[in-house]
Image (spheres, rainbow, N blue to C red):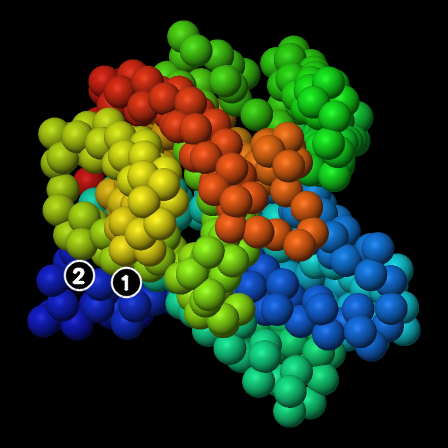
Amino acid sequence: MLSQSAQAPADPPDSYRTLLFGRYALSTWAVCLGVGLHALTWFMVATVVPSTVIDLGGARLMGWTMTAYLAASIVAGAAGGWTKRRLGARTALNLGAAVYLVGSAIALAAPTMSVVLVGRGLQGLGEGLVVALSYAMVREIFPSRLVPRVFGLEAVVWAGSALAGPVVAGLLTGALSWRAAFGVNLVLGAMLIGFVRFGIPRQVPDAGDARLPLGRLTLVGGGILVLSLAGNVRQPLVILAIVAAALGLLTACVLIDRTARTPLFPRRAFHPGDVVGRGFWLVVLMPIASTGLTVYMPLFVQTLFGFTPTGAGYFATITALAWSGTAIIIARFQGRRLADAAIALGPVLQAGGMAMVLAGFGAVSVVLIGVGLFAIGSGYGISWAFINQRIMQVADPAEGDLASALMPTLLSAGSALGAAIAGALANFAGIADPVTADMVHAVSAHLCIGGLALAGGSVVAGWRFSRVAPQPVPVR
Protein backbone atom coordinates (compact mmCIF):
# COMPACT_ATOMS: atom_id res chain seq x y z
CA MET A 1 0.00 0.00 0.00
CA LEU A 2 1.24 3.46 -0.93
CA SER A 3 1.99 6.15 1.64
CA GLN A 4 3.14 9.55 0.41
CA SER A 5 3.36 11.64 3.55
CA ALA A 6 3.04 11.44 7.30
CA GLN A 7 -0.50 11.68 8.52
CA ALA A 8 -1.20 14.67 10.76
CA PRO A 9 -2.05 13.54 14.27
CA ALA A 10 -5.24 15.62 14.29
CA ASP A 11 -6.64 13.90 11.21
CA PRO A 12 -9.22 11.22 12.02
CA PRO A 13 -8.21 8.06 10.14
CA ASP A 14 -11.51 7.94 8.22
CA SER A 15 -11.83 11.64 7.37
CA TYR A 16 -12.07 13.28 3.97
CA ARG A 17 -9.12 15.42 5.06
CA THR A 18 -6.98 12.28 5.21
CA LEU A 19 -7.99 11.44 1.65
CA LEU A 20 -7.53 14.91 0.20
CA PHE A 21 -4.58 16.31 2.17
CA GLY A 22 -3.11 13.55 4.31
CA ARG A 23 -1.68 10.11 3.93
CA TYR A 24 -3.59 9.18 0.77
CA ALA A 25 -3.69 12.63 -0.84
CA LEU A 26 -1.67 12.05 -4.01
CA SER A 27 -3.40 8.75 -4.67
CA THR A 28 -6.82 10.33 -4.11
CA TRP A 29 -6.08 13.19 -6.49
CA ALA A 30 -4.76 10.75 -9.09
CA VAL A 31 -7.83 8.50 -9.16
CA CYS A 32 -10.26 11.44 -8.94
CA LEU A 33 -8.51 13.22 -11.80
CA GLY A 34 -8.70 9.99 -13.79
CA VAL A 35 -12.48 10.02 -13.38
CA GLY A 36 -12.63 13.80 -13.89
CA LEU A 37 -10.80 13.44 -17.18
CA HIS A 38 -13.76 11.48 -18.52
CA ALA A 39 -16.45 13.67 -16.97
CA LEU A 40 -15.08 17.09 -17.91
CA THR A 41 -14.16 15.97 -21.42
CA TRP A 42 -17.66 14.63 -21.95
CA PHE A 43 -19.48 17.80 -20.87
CA MET A 44 -17.07 20.27 -22.47
CA VAL A 45 -16.97 18.57 -25.85
CA ALA A 46 -20.75 18.14 -25.91
CA THR A 47 -20.97 21.93 -25.49
CA VAL A 48 -18.49 22.88 -28.22
CA VAL A 49 -19.46 20.37 -30.93
CA PRO A 50 -22.13 22.66 -32.48
CA SER A 51 -19.49 25.42 -32.82
CA THR A 52 -17.08 22.88 -34.31
CA VAL A 53 -19.65 21.96 -36.95
CA ILE A 54 -20.32 25.61 -37.77
CA ASP A 55 -16.58 26.19 -38.22
CA LEU A 56 -15.58 23.00 -40.05
CA GLY A 57 -18.83 21.72 -41.54
CA GLY A 58 -19.73 18.03 -41.45
CA ALA A 59 -23.04 18.22 -39.61
CA ARG A 60 -23.82 14.64 -40.65
CA LEU A 61 -20.84 13.50 -38.55
CA MET A 62 -21.90 15.42 -35.44
CA GLY A 63 -23.40 12.43 -33.63
CA TRP A 64 -20.28 10.38 -34.26
CA THR A 65 -18.18 12.71 -32.11
CA MET A 66 -19.77 11.02 -29.10
CA THR A 67 -20.22 7.58 -30.67
CA ALA A 68 -16.54 7.26 -31.64
CA TYR A 69 -15.45 8.44 -28.20
CA LEU A 70 -17.82 6.13 -26.33
CA ALA A 71 -17.10 3.03 -28.42
CA ALA A 72 -13.34 3.50 -28.10
CA SER A 73 -13.67 4.18 -24.37
CA ILE A 74 -15.61 0.97 -23.78
CA VAL A 75 -13.13 -1.11 -25.79
CA ALA A 76 -10.17 0.32 -23.87
CA GLY A 77 -11.98 -0.10 -20.56
CA ALA A 78 -12.68 -3.75 -21.35
CA ALA A 79 -8.94 -4.22 -21.78
CA GLY A 80 -8.12 -2.31 -18.57
CA GLY A 81 -7.54 -5.33 -16.33
CA TRP A 82 -5.46 -7.08 -18.99
CA THR A 83 -3.35 -3.96 -19.57
CA LYS A 84 -2.76 -3.47 -15.84
CA ARG A 85 -1.45 -7.02 -15.49
CA ARG A 86 0.83 -6.75 -18.52
CA LEU A 87 2.27 -3.26 -17.96
CA GLY A 88 1.67 -2.44 -14.31
CA ALA A 89 -0.78 0.24 -13.17
CA ARG A 90 1.55 3.25 -13.37
CA THR A 91 2.81 2.46 -16.87
CA ALA A 92 -0.71 1.63 -18.10
CA LEU A 93 -2.10 4.90 -16.70
CA ASN A 94 0.69 6.87 -18.33
CA LEU A 95 -0.02 5.08 -21.62
CA GLY A 96 -3.70 5.95 -21.38
CA ALA A 97 -2.92 9.59 -20.57
CA ALA A 98 -0.45 9.79 -23.48
CA VAL A 99 -3.00 8.43 -25.96
CA TYR A 100 -5.56 10.88 -24.59
CA LEU A 101 -3.11 13.76 -25.05
CA VAL A 102 -2.41 12.76 -28.66
CA GLY A 103 -6.13 12.58 -29.38
CA SER A 104 -6.74 15.98 -27.77
CA ALA A 105 -3.92 17.55 -29.81
CA ILE A 106 -5.32 16.08 -33.05
CA ALA A 107 -8.83 17.37 -32.28
CA LEU A 108 -7.44 20.80 -31.34
CA ALA A 109 -5.61 21.18 -34.67
CA ALA A 110 -8.17 19.35 -36.83
CA PRO A 111 -8.87 20.97 -40.24
CA THR A 112 -12.02 18.86 -40.86
CA MET A 113 -14.68 17.02 -38.87
CA SER A 114 -13.25 13.70 -40.05
CA VAL A 115 -9.98 14.52 -38.31
CA VAL A 116 -11.89 15.59 -35.20
CA LEU A 117 -13.40 12.10 -35.14
CA VAL A 118 -9.91 10.57 -35.23
CA GLY A 119 -8.96 12.72 -32.25
CA ARG A 120 -12.16 11.82 -30.41
CA GLY A 121 -11.54 8.12 -30.96
CA LEU A 122 -8.04 8.40 -29.51
CA GLN A 123 -9.38 10.45 -26.60
CA GLY A 124 -11.83 7.65 -25.92
CA LEU A 125 -9.14 4.97 -26.04
CA GLY A 126 -6.93 6.84 -23.61
CA GLU A 127 -9.70 7.91 -21.27
CA GLY A 128 -11.33 4.47 -21.22
CA LEU A 129 -8.09 2.92 -20.04
CA VAL A 130 -7.49 5.69 -17.49
CA VAL A 131 -10.92 5.52 -15.85
CA ALA A 132 -10.89 1.71 -15.72
CA LEU A 133 -7.51 1.72 -14.00
CA SER A 134 -8.59 4.52 -11.67
CA TYR A 135 -11.35 2.25 -10.38
CA ALA A 136 -9.03 -0.76 -10.16
CA MET A 137 -6.50 1.16 -8.07
CA VAL A 138 -9.11 2.09 -5.45
CA ARG A 139 -9.18 -1.55 -4.43
CA GLU A 140 -5.41 -1.73 -4.01
CA ILE A 141 -4.49 1.63 -2.50
CA PHE A 142 -7.24 2.45 -0.01
CA PRO A 143 -8.40 0.51 3.06
CA SER A 144 -11.93 -0.86 2.75
CA ARG A 145 -13.33 1.63 5.30
CA LEU A 146 -12.35 4.53 2.99
CA VAL A 147 -13.57 3.04 -0.28
CA PRO A 148 -17.14 4.50 -0.05
CA ARG A 149 -15.63 7.94 0.59
CA VAL A 150 -13.36 7.66 -2.43
CA PHE A 151 -16.36 6.83 -4.60
CA GLY A 152 -18.22 9.72 -2.97
CA LEU A 153 -15.43 12.10 -3.99
CA GLU A 154 -15.54 10.70 -7.52
CA ALA A 155 -19.29 11.42 -7.61
CA VAL A 156 -18.56 15.01 -6.59
CA VAL A 157 -15.99 15.27 -9.38
CA TRP A 158 -18.62 14.09 -11.84
CA ALA A 159 -21.26 16.55 -10.61
CA GLY A 160 -18.74 19.41 -10.57
CA SER A 161 -17.83 18.60 -14.15
CA ALA A 162 -21.50 18.56 -15.13
CA LEU A 163 -21.89 22.06 -13.68
CA ALA A 164 -18.59 23.62 -14.73
CA GLY A 165 -17.98 21.86 -18.05
CA PRO A 166 -20.65 23.62 -20.14
CA VAL A 167 -19.90 27.01 -18.57
CA VAL A 168 -16.13 26.77 -19.07
CA ALA A 169 -16.51 25.44 -22.60
CA GLY A 170 -19.02 28.15 -23.49
CA LEU A 171 -16.83 30.95 -22.12
CA LEU A 172 -13.73 29.63 -23.88
CA THR A 173 -15.61 29.24 -27.17
CA GLY A 174 -17.00 32.75 -26.94
CA ALA A 175 -13.73 34.39 -25.94
CA LEU A 176 -11.31 32.31 -28.02
CA SER A 177 -12.47 29.29 -30.01
CA TRP A 178 -13.94 25.83 -29.63
CA ARG A 179 -10.37 24.60 -29.97
CA ALA A 180 -9.58 26.06 -26.53
CA ALA A 181 -11.73 23.34 -24.94
CA PHE A 182 -9.37 20.71 -26.32
CA GLY A 183 -6.51 22.81 -24.96
CA VAL A 184 -8.01 22.33 -21.49
CA ASN A 185 -8.00 18.58 -22.19
CA LEU A 186 -4.25 18.80 -22.83
CA VAL A 187 -3.69 20.51 -19.48
CA LEU A 188 -5.76 17.90 -17.62
CA GLY A 189 -3.90 15.03 -19.30
CA ALA A 190 -0.54 16.51 -18.35
CA MET A 191 -1.70 17.01 -14.75
CA LEU A 192 -2.79 13.39 -14.58
CA ILE A 193 0.66 12.16 -15.61
CA GLY A 194 2.16 14.20 -12.77
CA PHE A 195 -0.19 12.80 -10.13
CA VAL A 196 0.30 9.26 -11.42
CA ARG A 197 4.06 9.67 -11.09
CA PHE A 198 3.81 10.31 -7.33
CA GLY A 199 0.41 8.85 -6.38
CA ILE A 200 0.36 5.40 -7.97
CA PRO A 201 2.75 2.70 -6.75
CA ARG A 202 5.00 0.77 -9.09
CA GLN A 203 3.97 -2.77 -9.93
CA VAL A 204 5.82 -5.70 -11.43
CA PRO A 205 4.13 -6.62 -14.73
CA ASP A 206 2.82 -10.15 -15.21
CA ALA A 207 5.25 -12.12 -17.36
CA GLY A 208 2.50 -14.40 -18.73
CA ASP A 209 0.91 -14.51 -22.17
CA ALA A 210 1.14 -10.95 -23.49
CA ARG A 211 -1.07 -11.31 -26.56
CA LEU A 212 -3.76 -8.64 -26.81
CA PRO A 213 -7.21 -10.26 -27.29
CA LEU A 214 -8.03 -8.23 -30.40
CA GLY A 215 -10.83 -10.54 -31.54
CA ARG A 216 -12.87 -10.11 -28.37
CA LEU A 217 -12.19 -6.38 -28.24
CA THR A 218 -13.40 -6.13 -31.83
CA LEU A 219 -16.63 -7.85 -30.80
CA VAL A 220 -17.09 -5.31 -27.99
CA GLY A 221 -16.44 -2.32 -30.26
CA GLY A 222 -18.56 -3.75 -33.04
CA GLY A 223 -21.45 -4.36 -30.68
CA ILE A 224 -21.39 -0.78 -29.41
CA LEU A 225 -21.15 0.69 -32.94
CA VAL A 226 -24.01 -1.48 -34.20
CA LEU A 227 -26.06 -0.49 -31.16
CA SER A 228 -25.56 3.20 -31.94
CA LEU A 229 -27.47 2.72 -35.20
CA ALA A 230 -30.71 1.83 -33.41
CA GLY A 231 -31.44 5.43 -32.43
CA ASN A 232 -31.56 6.49 -36.10
CA VAL A 233 -34.18 3.98 -37.24
CA ARG A 234 -37.97 4.21 -37.09
CA GLN A 235 -39.10 0.71 -38.12
CA PRO A 236 -39.69 -1.42 -34.99
CA LEU A 237 -38.55 -4.68 -36.60
CA VAL A 238 -35.33 -3.07 -37.84
CA ILE A 239 -34.70 -1.62 -34.38
CA LEU A 240 -35.19 -5.04 -32.79
CA ALA A 241 -32.84 -6.61 -35.35
CA ILE A 242 -30.13 -4.02 -34.65
CA VAL A 243 -30.40 -4.39 -30.87
CA ALA A 244 -30.40 -8.18 -31.18
CA ALA A 245 -27.30 -8.09 -33.40
CA ALA A 246 -25.48 -5.80 -30.96
CA LEU A 247 -26.38 -7.95 -27.96
CA GLY A 248 -25.33 -11.02 -29.93
CA LEU A 249 -21.86 -9.60 -30.52
CA LEU A 250 -21.45 -8.61 -26.88
CA THR A 251 -22.73 -11.97 -25.65
CA ALA A 252 -20.38 -13.81 -27.99
CA CYS A 253 -17.47 -11.85 -26.54
CA VAL A 254 -18.41 -12.82 -22.96
CA LEU A 255 -18.89 -16.50 -23.83
CA ILE A 256 -15.65 -16.76 -25.80
CA ASP A 257 -13.81 -14.99 -23.00
CA ARG A 258 -14.78 -17.65 -20.45
CA THR A 259 -12.46 -20.20 -22.03
CA ALA A 260 -9.72 -17.83 -23.19
CA ARG A 261 -6.14 -18.02 -21.89
CA THR A 262 -6.06 -14.25 -21.37
CA PRO A 263 -9.53 -13.28 -20.12
CA LEU A 264 -10.91 -9.76 -20.24
CA PHE A 265 -13.66 -10.50 -17.71
CA PRO A 266 -14.03 -12.69 -14.62
CA ARG A 267 -14.75 -16.24 -15.75
CA ARG A 268 -18.39 -16.21 -14.67
CA ALA A 269 -19.18 -12.62 -15.63
CA PHE A 270 -22.95 -12.06 -15.90
CA HIS A 271 -23.70 -15.60 -14.77
CA PRO A 272 -26.85 -15.23 -12.63
CA GLY A 273 -25.66 -17.90 -10.22
CA ASP A 274 -22.32 -16.21 -9.54
CA VAL A 275 -21.95 -13.44 -6.96
CA VAL A 276 -19.86 -11.19 -9.22
CA GLY A 277 -22.21 -11.98 -12.10
CA ARG A 278 -25.14 -10.63 -10.07
CA GLY A 279 -23.22 -7.47 -9.30
CA PHE A 280 -22.37 -6.95 -12.96
CA TRP A 281 -26.03 -7.22 -13.91
CA LEU A 282 -26.89 -4.57 -11.34
CA VAL A 283 -24.12 -2.23 -12.57
CA VAL A 284 -25.28 -2.44 -16.18
CA LEU A 285 -29.07 -2.48 -15.64
CA MET A 286 -29.29 0.73 -13.61
CA PRO A 287 -27.90 3.02 -16.36
CA ILE A 288 -29.87 1.18 -19.06
CA ALA A 289 -33.08 2.05 -17.20
CA SER A 290 -32.42 5.76 -16.61
CA THR A 291 -30.19 7.02 -19.44
CA GLY A 292 -33.10 7.76 -21.79
CA LEU A 293 -34.47 10.43 -19.45
CA THR A 294 -31.01 12.00 -19.17
CA VAL A 295 -30.68 12.20 -22.94
CA TYR A 296 -34.09 13.71 -23.66
CA MET A 297 -34.82 15.74 -20.53
CA PRO A 298 -33.37 19.07 -21.81
CA LEU A 299 -35.48 18.83 -24.96
CA PHE A 300 -38.60 17.93 -22.99
CA VAL A 301 -38.44 20.82 -20.50
CA GLN A 302 -37.56 23.34 -23.21
CA THR A 303 -40.60 22.30 -25.22
CA LEU A 304 -43.08 21.82 -22.41
CA PHE A 305 -42.05 24.50 -19.90
CA GLY A 306 -40.19 27.06 -22.00
CA PHE A 307 -36.78 26.59 -20.38
CA THR A 308 -33.79 28.20 -22.04
CA PRO A 309 -31.16 25.78 -23.39
CA THR A 310 -28.85 26.60 -20.48
CA GLY A 311 -31.62 26.27 -17.91
CA ALA A 312 -32.72 22.97 -19.41
CA GLY A 313 -29.18 21.64 -19.32
CA TYR A 314 -28.80 22.49 -15.66
CA PHE A 315 -32.25 21.10 -14.81
CA ALA A 316 -31.04 17.77 -16.21
CA THR A 317 -28.06 17.84 -13.83
CA ILE A 318 -30.36 17.39 -10.82
CA THR A 319 -29.66 13.67 -11.07
CA ALA A 320 -25.89 14.16 -10.97
CA LEU A 321 -26.12 16.60 -8.06
CA ALA A 322 -28.36 14.26 -6.06
CA TRP A 323 -25.95 11.40 -6.78
CA SER A 324 -23.01 13.41 -5.43
CA GLY A 325 -24.80 14.79 -2.39
CA THR A 326 -26.18 11.48 -1.19
CA ALA A 327 -22.89 9.68 -1.94
CA ILE A 328 -20.99 12.10 0.30
CA ILE A 329 -23.54 11.71 3.13
CA ILE A 330 -23.85 7.92 2.99
CA ALA A 331 -20.07 7.46 2.82
CA ARG A 332 -19.78 8.77 6.39
CA PHE A 333 -21.41 5.59 7.67
CA GLN A 334 -20.16 2.01 7.74
CA GLY A 335 -21.50 -1.45 8.46
CA ARG A 336 -22.73 -4.57 6.73
CA ARG A 337 -26.41 -3.88 7.43
CA LEU A 338 -26.17 -0.37 6.01
CA ALA A 339 -24.44 -1.67 2.89
CA ASP A 340 -27.09 -4.37 2.42
CA ALA A 341 -29.91 -1.85 2.79
CA ALA A 342 -28.26 0.70 0.49
CA ILE A 343 -27.64 -1.85 -2.29
CA ALA A 344 -31.25 -3.04 -2.14
CA LEU A 345 -32.79 0.44 -1.77
CA GLY A 346 -30.86 2.21 -4.55
CA PRO A 347 -32.69 0.57 -7.47
CA VAL A 348 -36.02 1.00 -5.65
CA LEU A 349 -35.41 4.74 -5.37
CA GLN A 350 -34.45 4.82 -9.04
CA ALA A 351 -37.69 3.09 -10.04
CA GLY A 352 -39.73 5.34 -7.75
CA GLY A 353 -38.10 8.41 -9.26
CA MET A 354 -38.96 7.29 -12.76
CA ALA A 355 -42.58 6.78 -11.69
CA MET A 356 -42.60 10.35 -10.33
CA VAL A 357 -41.18 11.69 -13.59
CA LEU A 358 -43.91 9.85 -15.49
CA ALA A 359 -46.55 11.36 -13.19
CA GLY A 360 -44.91 14.79 -13.53
CA PHE A 361 -45.20 14.82 -17.30
CA GLY A 362 -48.79 13.61 -17.04
CA ALA A 363 -49.63 16.42 -14.60
CA VAL A 364 -47.39 18.94 -16.42
CA SER A 365 -45.59 19.58 -13.13
CA VAL A 366 -41.95 20.60 -13.36
CA VAL A 367 -41.64 20.28 -9.57
CA LEU A 368 -42.72 16.64 -9.60
CA ILE A 369 -40.35 15.91 -12.49
CA GLY A 370 -37.51 17.55 -10.56
CA VAL A 371 -38.30 15.50 -7.44
CA GLY A 372 -38.28 12.37 -9.59
CA LEU A 373 -34.86 13.22 -11.04
CA PHE A 374 -33.59 13.83 -7.51
CA ALA A 375 -34.86 10.40 -6.43
CA ILE A 376 -33.16 8.74 -9.40
CA GLY A 377 -29.85 10.40 -8.54
CA SER A 378 -30.25 9.53 -4.86
CA GLY A 379 -30.76 5.89 -5.82
CA TYR A 380 -27.35 5.90 -7.46
CA GLY A 381 -25.78 7.94 -4.68
CA ILE A 382 -26.73 5.71 -1.76
CA SER A 383 -25.89 2.43 -3.48
CA TRP A 384 -23.14 2.91 -6.07
CA ALA A 385 -20.14 2.96 -3.73
CA PHE A 386 -21.40 -0.08 -1.80
CA ILE A 387 -22.11 -1.99 -5.02
CA ASN A 388 -18.60 -1.34 -6.30
CA GLN A 389 -17.03 -2.13 -2.93
CA ARG A 390 -18.90 -5.41 -2.63
CA ILE A 391 -17.90 -6.52 -6.12
CA MET A 392 -14.29 -5.87 -5.11
CA GLN A 393 -14.80 -7.88 -1.92
CA VAL A 394 -16.49 -10.94 -3.43
CA ALA A 395 -14.37 -11.22 -6.58
CA ASP A 396 -11.81 -14.01 -6.75
CA PRO A 397 -8.47 -12.41 -5.75
CA ALA A 398 -6.96 -13.65 -9.01
CA GLU A 399 -9.67 -11.76 -10.93
CA GLY A 400 -9.82 -8.65 -8.77
CA ASP A 401 -8.18 -6.40 -11.36
CA LEU A 402 -10.58 -7.58 -14.07
CA ALA A 403 -13.67 -7.03 -11.90
CA SER A 404 -12.61 -3.61 -10.59
CA ALA A 405 -11.52 -2.22 -13.95
CA LEU A 406 -14.74 -3.34 -15.65
CA MET A 407 -17.13 -1.38 -13.44
CA PRO A 408 -16.86 2.03 -15.17
CA THR A 409 -16.86 0.24 -18.52
CA LEU A 410 -20.10 -1.52 -17.65
CA LEU A 411 -21.58 1.84 -16.62
CA SER A 412 -20.63 3.29 -20.02
CA ALA A 413 -21.92 0.22 -21.86
CA GLY A 414 -25.20 0.40 -19.95
CA SER A 415 -25.49 4.09 -20.79
CA ALA A 416 -24.84 3.36 -24.48
CA LEU A 417 -27.46 0.62 -24.52
CA GLY A 418 -29.92 2.83 -22.63
CA ALA A 419 -29.39 5.71 -25.08
CA ALA A 420 -29.94 3.39 -28.06
CA ILE A 421 -33.13 1.96 -26.55
CA ALA A 422 -34.33 5.47 -25.73
CA GLY A 423 -33.73 6.61 -29.32
CA ALA A 424 -35.65 3.61 -30.61
CA LEU A 425 -38.55 4.28 -28.23
CA ALA A 426 -38.60 7.98 -29.15
CA ASN A 427 -38.73 7.16 -32.85
CA PHE A 428 -41.43 4.57 -32.23
CA ALA A 429 -43.44 7.19 -30.31
CA GLY A 430 -43.30 9.50 -33.33
CA ILE A 431 -40.75 12.17 -32.41
CA ALA A 432 -40.08 14.54 -35.33
CA ASP A 433 -39.24 18.14 -36.16
CA PRO A 434 -40.63 20.41 -34.90
CA VAL A 435 -41.08 18.85 -31.48
CA THR A 436 -44.47 19.69 -29.95
CA ALA A 437 -45.95 19.36 -26.48
CA ASP A 438 -48.05 16.38 -27.61
CA MET A 439 -44.89 14.65 -28.82
CA VAL A 440 -43.21 15.27 -25.47
CA HIS A 441 -46.13 13.66 -23.65
CA ALA A 442 -46.05 10.62 -25.94
CA VAL A 443 -42.28 10.17 -25.96
CA SER A 444 -41.83 10.77 -22.23
CA ALA A 445 -44.52 8.15 -21.49
CA HIS A 446 -42.74 5.60 -23.69
CA LEU A 447 -39.35 6.35 -22.08
CA CYS A 448 -40.65 6.25 -18.51
CA ILE A 449 -42.70 3.07 -18.96
CA GLY A 450 -39.83 1.35 -20.77
CA GLY A 451 -37.41 2.57 -18.11
CA LEU A 452 -39.66 1.32 -15.33
CA ALA A 453 -39.78 -2.13 -16.92
CA LEU A 454 -35.97 -2.20 -17.01
CA ALA A 455 -35.77 -0.76 -13.50
CA GLY A 456 -37.76 -3.77 -12.32
CA GLY A 457 -34.77 -5.89 -13.34
CA SER A 458 -32.51 -3.54 -11.36
CA VAL A 459 -34.69 -3.95 -8.27
CA VAL A 460 -34.49 -7.74 -8.47
CA ALA A 461 -30.74 -7.66 -9.13
CA GLY A 462 -30.21 -5.23 -6.25
CA TRP A 463 -32.18 -7.37 -3.81
CA ARG A 464 -30.27 -10.51 -4.81
CA PHE A 465 -26.89 -8.79 -4.68
CA SER A 466 -27.63 -7.23 -1.28
CA ARG A 467 -27.89 -10.77 0.13
CA VAL A 468 -24.34 -11.66 -0.97
CA ALA A 469 -22.03 -11.88 2.03
CA PRO A 470 -18.71 -10.05 1.48
CA GLN A 471 -15.54 -11.78 2.50
CA PRO A 472 -13.73 -10.33 5.53
CA VAL A 473 -11.14 -7.78 4.46
CA PRO A 474 -8.01 -7.29 6.58
CA VAL A 475 -7.84 -3.87 8.25
CA ARG A 476 -5.01 -1.77 6.75
Residue type, label 1: Leu
Q: Toward the viewer: 105 or 394?
A: 105
Position of the C terminus by quadrant = top left
In the image, residue 91 sits, relative to residue 407, either above or below, namely below
Left/right of residue 407 with respect to residue 223 in the rendered view:
left
Label 1 environment density (alpha carbons within 10 Å; few <14, some 14–19, many ≥20): many
Q: Toward the viewer: 427 or 160?
A: 427
Q: Toward the viewer: 300 or 263?
A: 300
Residue 103 visible from this viewpoint: yes
Residue 245 visible from this viewpoint: no
Q: Element at badge 1? A: helix
Do the numbered discs 2 and 1 sit on residues whose CB atoms are within 8 Å? yes
Q: Residue at x 14, y 35 (%)?
A: 338
Q: Residue at x 87, y 68 (%)?
A: 57
Quarter-of-image position of residue 346: top left
Residue labelled with disc 2: 15
Residue type, label 2: Ser
Q: Residue furthest bottom?
A: 175
How many marks the image carries: the answer is 2
Provide residue 449's location: percent of width, then percent of height. Answer: 43, 28
In the image, residue 302 sits, relative to residue 67, either above or below, namely below
Q: Toward the viewer: 190 or 302?
A: 302
Q: Residue at x 61, y 52 (%)?
A: 435
In the image, residue 183 sits, relative to residue 65, either above or below, namely below
Residue labelled with disc 1: 19
Provide residue 72's location: percent of width, then percent of height. Answer: 71, 45
Q: Residue at x 26, y 30 (%)?
A: 348
Q: Element at badge 2? A: loop
Provide residue 34's location: percent of width, then percent of height. Answer: 51, 59
